[in-house]
Amino acid sequence: MVKLRVKAAGAATVLAICGLAVVGCSSDDGKTGSAPAIPTTVAVQVQMWDPCTMSDDLIRRAGLDPTTKQVQPIPSTRSKICRWKGVDVIVDVLSQPDRTIQDLRQKGDNHDFQDVLVGGRPALMYTSGAQTPSLTMDVAFSLHGGVVDLVVIKRSESRRPAVDSARQISAVLVEGLPQ
């Protein structure tokens, strides 16, 4: 869960809540009174999406084997990872509530950023690590409360470039992501 904090905007918020910006707040007895106490913070819980809930049919259409699904635990984080294998790739789908697309851009070993549209949705395609040519290609989508990152790892014996696999797989898996 992601906790968002919403701060009250002071007197303007109190007046807007009362609905009487000029006259003031009034009680049932018609007397003008003081504004009710408003908490300065409100905790809002946002449920982060679980990538392991993607359907077997969707996984198959992406060229992956649903029977290879592995839940990858990440100690001491709220992130969730599910992994599937295909003939020439391994795909990790990471749901990261504490990350933003900007965080991914600023991470030191991420590079070769491309802003792309996948299934009509904006995404960030990039590589990570120093290996050239890279065996991985990431496609990240911003979600309410975090980021979902599709990490496509090319098997070393595959002749298909990781970027081609990432484009094909993300075009299918985007259908399973929440809006």
Image (cartoon, helix red, strand yellow):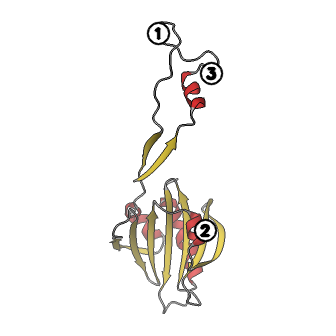
Label 1: how many Cα within 10 Å (few below 14, some 14–19, many 20+): few
Mark linked to residue 124: 2
Residue appearing at x 58%, y 21% in the figure? 19
Disc with the residue nearer the chain's start (2 vs 1): 1
C-beta proximity under 8 Å, tags 2 and 1: no
Q: Nearer the viewer, residue 133 or 20?
A: 20
SS category of the residue bearing label 2: strand
Separation (CA) of disc 3 from disc 2: 45 Å
Residue appearing at x 52%, y 41% in the figure? 7
Disc 3 marks a residue whose amino acid type is Ala
**In the rendered image of this protein, does residue 41 appear above or below residue 156?**
above
Q: Position of residue 63 (x, y in %)?
A: 47, 75
Q: Nearer the viewer, residue 161 or 138?
A: 138
Residue appearing at x 54%, y 62% in the figure? 100
- The residue that disc 1 covers is 28
- The residue that disc 3 covers is 21
Disc with the residue nearer the chain's start (3 vs 1): 3
Label 3: how many Cα within 10 Å (few below 14, some 14–19, many 20+): some
Q: Nearer the viewer, residue 54 or 13?
A: 13
Can residue 164 be seen at all in this image of the molecule? no
SS category of the residue bearing label 3: loop
